Amino acid sequence: MGYARPIRLGMVGGGAGAFIGDVHRIASRIDGDFDLIAGALSSTADRAQASGRALGLAPDRIYDDFKVMAMREARLKDGIEAVTIVTPNHMHFPAAREFLKRGIHVICDKPLSSNLRDAKKLLEAAEKSNALFVLTHNYTGYPMVRQAREMVSKGDIGDIRVVQAEYPQDWLTEAEELQDNKQAEWRTDPARSGVGGSIGDIGTHAFNLLSFVTGLETESLAADLQSFVPGRRLDDNAHTMLRFEGGARGMLWSSQVAPGNENALRLRVYGSKGGLEWAQEDPNYLWYTPFGEAKRLITRGGVAANSVAARVSRTPGGHPEGYLEGFANIYAEAAKAIRGRQAGQKTDPEVVYPTVYDGVRGVAFIEACVASSNRNAAWVKF
Amino acid sequence: MGYARPIRLGMVGGGAGAFIGDVHRIASRIDGDFDLIAGALSSTADRAQASGRALGLAPDRIYDDFKVMAMREARLKDGIEAVTIVTPNHMHFPAAREFLKRGIHVICDKPLSSNLRDAKKLLEAAEKSNALFVLTHNYTGYPMVRQAREMVSKGDIGDIRVVQAEYPQDWLTEAEELQDNKQAEWRTDPARSGVGGSIGDIGTHAFNLLSFVTGLETESLAADLQSFVPGRRLDDNAHTMLRFEGGARGMLWSSQVAPGNENALRLRVYGSKGGLEWAQEDPNYLWYTPFGEAKRLITRGGVAANSVAARVSRTPGGHPEGYLEGFANIYAEAAKAIRGRQAGQKTDPEVVYPTVYDGVRGVAFIEACVASSNRNAAWVKF
Amino acid sequence: MGYARPIRLGMVGGGAGAFIGDVHRIASRIDGDFDLIAGALSSTADRAQASGRALGLAPDRIYDDFKVMAMREARLKDGIEAVTIVTPNHMHFPAAREFLKRGIHVICDKPLSSNLRDAKKLLEAAEKSNALFVLTHNYTGYPMVRQAREMVSKGDIGDIRVVQAEYPQDWLTEAEELQDNKQAEWRTDPARSGVGGSIGDIGTHAFNLLSFVTGLETESLAADLQSFVPGRRLDDNAHTMLRFEGGARGMLWSSQVAPGNENALRLRVYGSKGGLEWAQEDPNYLWYTPFGEAKRLITRGGVAANSVAARVSRTPGGHPEGYLEGFANIYAEAAKAIRGRQAGQKTDPEVVYPTVYDGVRGVAFIEACVASSNRNAAWVKF
Amino acid sequence: MGYARPIRLGMVGGGAGAFIGDVHRIASRIDGDFDLIAGALSSTADRAQASGRALGLAPDRIYDDFKVMAMREARLKDGIEAVTIVTPNHMHFPAAREFLKRGIHVICDKPLSSNLRDAKKLLEAAEKSNALFVLTHNYTGYPMVRQAREMVSKGDIGDIRVVQAEYPQDWLTEAEELQDNKQAEWRTDPARSGVGGSIGDIGTHAFNLLSFVTGLETESLAADLQSFVPGRRLDDNAHTMLRFEGGARGMLWSSQVAPGNENALRLRVYGSKGGLEWAQEDPNYLWYTPFGEAKRLITRGGVAANSVAARVSRTPGGHPEGYLEGFANIYAEAAKAIRGRQAGQKTDPEVVYPTVYDGVRGVAFIEACVASSNRNAAWVKF
């Protein structure tokens, strides 16, 4: 990993205090593939400057307007080659568009946008651009998730019948958005987040994960969304039933009001020949249960890890990797794809990252859930 | 526990080879409260005799017709005082009726009956009778389930918002019913089981458990039932969304085609102040997660077990109790209720067991799930 | 199981309030193999009477002197055929002797005696007697322990190299013996317990378990015993290193002052080809780790359980069995052995229970540990 | 974290294929505190060049002799400010000496040296130097380890009585050193590793960890070392009993022949008021068991994490951090200490990292274990 010249990176959003900005910066550094040299870290001039200086950016590479940044960086000889977008959801589209049209590769936080209209425009922009678009559905970066996907694809569990996905958290159990918690404020604000609350913030992750691992196409869904905390404007709990093409069925639960659950994304897949179970909070383990045999615990880096998992592992078994390493794998894949593109090569088929198409599907999922819930959880075609 | 004169017990069904017959017999013996002295263990004369003799029953107390047994035992001076019914579902009603009308207490396996019509007739029979009717929803006998119920009722987790119940198994992953497996045969046969497959056999357990612990009344439900194994006549997987009176919501999953799951009944309940999680396969543990505090692991017999749990525990913490002890607790409660009734006393309020009303609710649940599924998972009032 | 005429059983010790008395009574009842009809439950006449009556014993079968009981029961036509001895340790030998010499089978709690001298006399008495002597090292009754032993014996883990045994508890973390806790009083009293505290009460269990599973003979040991609670007269924590014949090595830790540990007996065995791990508090699971392959979780009653485990299981996988069922397996084996003896047959080789020889080894282990500790943890031949 | 000018870093050892070199490089990058600009990555000129170029080092900053590197870099205006030493053990001392005497800060892998003589000379060199010496006992960097240490120090578990430390692995179960495995070769070679095998490679980690968390000083120890694999020249399994000043006792087990254990470092500490348990493979969890209360699961980043843990955490609860983040915390502490030293400030007391003194203690521990084992596990003063 790493060792080639680092790719020059910019960032939009992610000023001081934004959890996800730090995560992206660390993820971009782990393998030495990127060098953060410019940023529009805030749209407030003062905060933009303070955040940029704290990060050691050169003063003339600190912006408070992503459009200005895109224009100027595109003209600089040593301008950024890629940009990370970590703003609230509603700004993903306008920001991404500016960079894509100038040929600057975009690494964008999920969900793709705050509504399907923007998502489709962004898709169009991405298709027109020479630049790559990478969506950080970071949970697909975990080695054991990659292993599960490969095992499903090789038929290890037979034909898939049942998918159980869940993503409970508890941080919005009380009305955190009224307590001056910026994270809670924008994530419960339809203007900035879109129509989805828990279903948009984390339900999409679960949906993306199950699609990634199983390869199943969703045919229709029925969703029952709730806002349990008085005054909350978006759902904080969502129950969804899924029907997949080919006949498999699923359930998906997202919640931000389930006390005791920190970030408990979990996927279970059952087929005619076996099952697989994975939990994000213990990501180095994958349970594999071939029907009629003892359960097996596959460990990242361990004897039963396959080459697909090994490719995105940095340490041997028993040396746990976590959230940041999984996130860094998306950056590592992005770097490989960008370098391949720069070298005029076809992308290596083993390089895998979430694309703008996954992003559109994710926003469509959110809107379908809300539409279903508004119609008393009727089945909605996907 | 125990130490009073054992109650004279009979049994209908449960001949050699029937798993559940052995379970009831052990459960009835553990505390020394019952003495099995008569049985119509099979409707086939030869099997009835062989099974009865193997159990050490006196030859004149072995029957091959439960009606004859009910009539004769009711007349004997030392006739049975109670009877256990462990036949396939469709025989629960006719058998129970015979004993109830002769004042013999009935301990009956779940579900109450194979259809709601029979369930209601059985309810009527039970209401008319002097005898008690106890339904062996055995999972309510586990000490940590009792503890959870008490904690919910005392408000430890606040107002309930979300209930997640699941009961996956894997033993019907393949077409076991074609392999000369008697258990599989009758459980997948509508004539003997009723309209529910997995939803009737185990979904009712999950439904009973969540109702028992939370005290919530179900308002409506939407269910999506599947038969994944070719040729299977009843559902082997069921996805259900629940709405409770007062606004709480739930999901319930039952499956008999989820490889790696032996008998994985699990309940999670989340309220405005905390959460509770319990898994049947590790029944001595109860997770309690008060919002804003570290998770706590409450153990059966341990320092944080409450008096309700202690009342139905036989051993100290760290000496695991299991399925049979939980089952035996239903028998122990039945014995207390029967002795109280015999002594003309009011039933002690701390004595708790599943009743015919729970049984009717269970059958109504099965039929509502099937009705919903038949209408494309539309919401059905409960 | 069961179904033959119950064996007539008596009990010495185990009056009201004695935890272990209840455990033995339940264990003897689970399979219907024994019928408790006589008892010298206490040496205090009043308590003996009260306890006997509470258990429903006939008044003339209640004794306050085990010697009188042994003499009289031996003469009765329907006298007891077997007796359970659950007194404090120092009374095991005198009580057992009385019954053995009258041909009454003895089921005796562990450790065999409070000192090696008594143990050897008891051995002699057992060898002279026609009656059987069964020691309730109950943890050998667990199905997954039996499975482990069979796997070791078949060579599944190759040549054993390392054994890690531990048995921590926490109930004596404070000076419980000064708080009117009878259990704590006699277990910390050298006159009643012998020279071992934690090493005698629970260390012997761990030692018996490791010997049972591995089949290894202990060559020598070095032990470092401590009494952490001020004023305590026996060890409450013991660290032991073991050397086995053939070169394997082990560690054994027993403690009654390890907060958070209820009854955490645990055994891990590693050989040249694989490993096995088992924990008493989660007894339905056995980890098997063949070197170079994924870890496997073997479950009691599950697909990978062997016939040796199945033979002593009562329920299918996922229906957890616990401490009482494991204990009952010792009684079930005792019943089989007694019936075989009564029928004049050779004991079936699959019938396995701890014998007086195991008991002597256990007491020798205790004394060796104390001797080593007294000599600054020098190696002591075993 | 980070954001100041990166510290210029060099590396000795860690050429292509060396697992630990990659680990150090990633750890040094995570927070952006260091910039690797020079290296003597191998003593073989070709390998040194190839490895240096692969890492993007400038050609004139690639060396094949650490002495030359130390001399030249010390003279350069933009020479390295710190160096990481990741050679086999016997080279730690000569390499560290060169840099220390030129005022270049040293970050050195453990154990400190291959023998106590070198360790003491290195101590002397470190004491004489203006430069800092940081030993990468990386497991002390885990947030939950820091939390445990703080809890012990605040008296949360009372006076410590018992310490159980273990570090089993399985990668040397077979004679890997004969299979052209470089890692196995030098780690089983006395000339390069010193007198300790498993006890030196991983036992020291366990010893360092227990000392770090408990603050206990070891008074004496008795060790029983084994080499189970035929032909192996150093121990591959070690059993140790420990006595601490003040009366606490401990056991420490290290093994590289325990199948199923990847890197299973684990620490359990029990005091008069409670217990703490931590396992390296699941590092985001800390069990806390106050005596007489329910067990509590403290999570990294969670509600019960203290400020000492939060200080070294990068992500919120439920976003698992792992081995690399723990390792990076040692680098982050080193960066803080180096910058403080450069600024002429006293080191912030909250900055904690393993020192040369810990290193000397570690080597003394290894030699004491070997000495004890050579004298039939006699007690050896520490």
Image: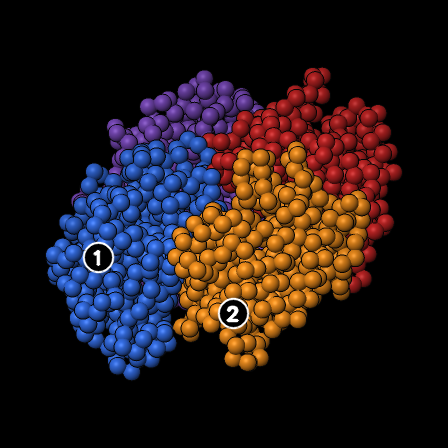
Chain colours: A purple, B blue, C orange, D red
Question: What is the crowding at mark 1: few (fewer than 14 residues within 10 Å), some, or many (at least 20)?
Answer: many
**Which sits in the foreground, A197 or C26?**
C26
The residue beneath circle 1 is B133
Task: Return the mark for residue B340.
Answer: none
Local secondary structure at mark 1: strand
Q: Position of residue A102 (x, y in %)?
A: 43, 37
Closer mark to the observer between disc 1 and disc 2: 2
Question: Can residue D155 be seen in the rendering of this structure?
Answer: yes
Residue A293 versus residue A200: which sits nearer the camera? A293
Q: Residue at x 17, y 71 (%)?
A: B71
* Quadrant housing residue A161: bottom left
Q: Residue furthest bottom?
A: B46
Residue placed under numbered mark 2 in the picture? C75
Label 2 neighbour load within 10 Å: few <14, some 14-19, many 20+ = few
Side of D141 relative to B272 (left or right): right
- Residue B128, image x and y in percent? 12, 56
**Residue drawn at 21 percent across, 69 percent down:** B76
Helix, strand or loop at label 2? It is helix
User: Numbered disc 1: what chain?
Assistant: B
Task: Say yes or no: labels 1 and 2 on the same chain.
Answer: no
Quarter where residue C345 is shown: bottom right
The three-letter amino acid code for the residue at tag 2 is Arg
Q: Is residue A291 above or below residue B148?
A: below
Residue at mark 2: chain: C
